[in-house]
Image: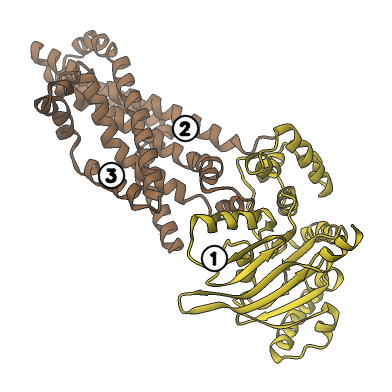
Amino acid sequence: MYSETNQTMSKPMLTIQNLSKSYGEICAVRDVSLKVSKGEVVALCGRSGSGKSTLLRCINYLEIPDRGTIRIGPVSVEAGPMTRQMSQEIRDLRLHSGMVFQAFNLFPHRTVIENVTEGLTVVKDMSKHAAKSAGTRLLEKVGLADKSDVYPNRLSGGQQQRVAIARALAMNPDLLLIDEPTSALDPELIGEVLGVMRNLADDGMTMVVVTHELGFAVEVADRLIYMDDGIILEQGPPDVLIKNPETLSLKKFLGAIATRSQELALI
Amino acid sequence: MRNILNNFGSAKVWVPTRSSEFATILRHEKLVQASLLLGFITMFMVLGLDVQYMLDKLPLLVVTIPLVLVISFCATVLACLLGLIAALSRLSNSPIYYVPAKLYVSLFQGIPLIVLLFILYFGLPHLNPVLLLTPIQAGIIGLALSNGAFLTEVFRSSVLSVPEGQSEAARAIGMSSRQRMWRIILPQAARIALPPTANYYIFILKDSALVGFIGVAELFSTAQSIGQRDFKILEMLLLAGAVYWIITIVLSSIQTKLEQRMETAYSRET
């Protein structure tokens, strides 16, 4: 029993093999392969247009990759023509992964608790009562139990993003995909969202996070991946990568971010 | 492609607002309405119209209002149903669905309502006597078919104007396309579609005057026959116009209230 758990620990939770995605002439992701082990937190950074968001969205097939294989836990999907069987596989893939969006994308016509329980009652056929108690537990986890019956437009951006995280967690995913979670937030609201993500990392949640918050990456992520022009240019422990960038591209990128934060510090 | 669709969608949304703009003017300028009414009455008297006769005959027109309301209400409900089915079919990826829907929209947007009504009432029985409809049935079906074609476009653009992120969020939690449409997209699209749909009720109500031509004794045809009998044609036509106008004012004020309630719907706390 013990050895079996040990084996699953070492087995990658997410495996991406030779993934490519292009939009017409533009190649957004070029032949990327990546393994993420259980409990690992990976931060993805790069310039806009570097393919980091596309890569993330390909993982749960919100973007349909042209080539490559994606495996999350027990589910594996290989890119190919969209058949009935394929779309069932994609739904399976999505059930094993949760997604948090830059723009939150909460359902405006559902209350906070309904947002969290929607997937449980509709997709997992859970009873309303059971879903509600599960949802309430998750809202407590993100510190919003008191907002349960409020509509999303009454919440601040930070609160909305925390509800979105609770909604993704409700499906009990093996892997959480988080796309620039703080980019749409006012500076003073960033901390609360990063705090929730830090707690998740401490609980052992496997996460792939597209982010520009390098401080968060250093503190929470096990690995930082720098993407440029659709490929993984550099990767490694965040502090090492930030201190000793090998490529000129990453040096320039870090320089640009440093200048920006210095400017902010001056203000 | 998504962008083109979205732009197309948002461009289409305002198409039916021509009457809502009109309605806004009506709404905010009660004073203008009152002075217009006074102006009309003065004009009637100056023109030598028999105002007393008009007031006497008013009840005869008022009794037809329920019929007008019922015909246009039934037609609107049926048109919404047709519009919803056709809109969902048009949004489908399968040509089996979107080709017939497109054909329906193009055909019934293209045929003038009066021609359609004549086909339904006078034409169809020639094909088969079973198809003989009562004038009211033919009227409701004609109004519904023709306005359903326009509502199809309203509903389709409403669905397209729900942000893409909503569908993505629903997909990310594993919802099937049917679940996404009925639980996430349509409730939000309905909110967007409500004001223009309410406008269509007003359009349909006014178009219901055409049903008089296939023998329904509704407001307009009643006014016309009384006017011809008494040689007071202008009086009765003006009176009919005034009654339609007042119904429209009442309906658009109800519409405003409905819109205000919808606007506050998501923001209410608990």
Instruction: Give percent across and percent down for residue B258.
Output: 49, 30
Q: Residue at x 31, y 33 (%)?
A: B203
Q: Which residue is mark 3?
A: B105
Instruction: Give percent across and percent down for residue B194.
Output: 45, 37
Residue B256 image label: 2
Crowdedness of circle 3 by 10 Å Cα count: few (<14), some, many (20+)?
many
Left or right: B244 in relation to A206: left
User: Helix, strand or loop at disc 1?
Assistant: loop
Q: Quadrant of residue B218?
A: top left
Q: Amino acid at mark 1?
A: Ile
In this structure image, what is the colour of chain B?
brown
Q: Residue at x 33, y 33 (%)?
A: B79
Q: CA distance from mark 3 to mark 2?
A: 28 Å
Badge 3 and badge 2 in a common chain? yes
Q: Residue at x 79, y 74 (%)?
A: A214
Q: Nearer the viewer, residue B213 or B166?
A: B166
Q: Amino acid at mark 2?
A: Thr
Q: From the viewer's perspective, is residue A197 above or below residue B121?
A: below
- The quadrant the N terminus of chain A occupies is bottom right
